[in-house]
Amino acid sequence: MRLHSSGSHGPTKKKRSRPFSGCVLVAEVRGDAAGFAAVLRRDDGEMELDGLFVEPDLWRCGIGRALVGRSSVLARQAGAKTLTVLGNRHAEAFYLSCGFTA
C-alpha cells in the first residue's frame, strides 16, 4: 500500500504566507486507488477528518487505519491539538478503535 497526498500548501518546517488548510490523502494498492481521507482546517484552527473512504472489498486490510494515522500526523505537523471526525454510527467502533473518543 502506498499513501500520497495532494494539497497546495501542506505543513512544512518552512514559513509559509498561508497556513495549512488541508489536503486529500490517497491510498493505492498495486497502483489502483484503494481509499482516501480529506483533512481540513476548522474555523477554530483545529483539524477535521472531513471524509474517509475505503473500497469495500479492501475493508479490514489496514487501509482506513493507515489513512487515519497519516491524517493525525499531518494535523499535528500543522499545529493542531485535536483531529475531530463526525462519523456515522455504523463507523463508530472503527473510529473508537483508532483512538477517537465519543
Image (cartoon, rainbow, N blue to C red):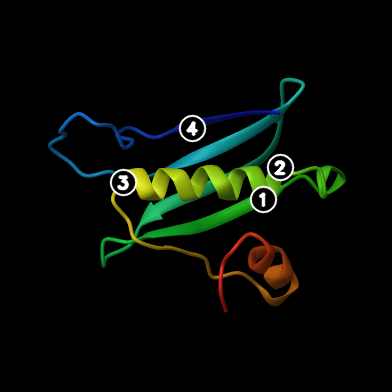
Q: Position of residue 48 (x, y in %)?
A: 43, 60
The three-letter code of the residue at mark 3 reads Ala
Q: Amino acid at mark 1?
A: Phe
Q: Looking at the image, is mark 1 or mark 4 earlier in the sequence?
A: 4
Name the mark on residue 92: none
Q: Is residue 90 left or right of residue 73?
A: right
Estimate the spatial distance between the alpha carbons at disc 1 and disc 3, rounded to whole Å. Answer: 22 Å
Q: 52 and 15: which one is in front?
A: 15
Q: CA distance from mark 4 to mark 2?
A: 14 Å
Disc 3: which residue: 78
| Residue carrying label 2 | 63
Q: Which residue is mark 4?
A: 5
Q: Earlier in the sequence, mark 3 or mark 2?
A: 2
Residue 99, by quadrant, is bottom right
What amino acid type should be assigned to the residue bearing mark 2? Ile
Residue 91 screen position, x and y as percent: 71, 67
Q: Residue at x 34, y 43 (%)?
A: 77
Q: Residues within 10 Å of mark 4 (few under 14, many from 20)?
A: some
Give the alpha-carbon distance from disc 3 to disc 4, as whole Å. Answer: 14 Å
The CA distance from mark 1 to mark 4 is: 15 Å
Element class at badge 2: helix
Residue 80 lies, with reference to residue 62, above or below; the image says below
- Percent x, y of residue 68: 58, 50
Q: What residue is shown with label 1?
A: 53
Q: Nearer the viewer, mark 1 or mark 2?
A: 2
Q: Residue at x 52, y 66 (%)?
A: 85
Element under disc 4: strand
> Considering only order in the chain, which callout, 3 or 1, is on the residue closer to the N terminus?
1
Could you say which quadrant of the image residue 29 lies in? Answer: top right
Helix, strand or loop status at disc 3: loop
Q: Are marks 3 and 2 in contact (CB under 8 Å)?
A: no
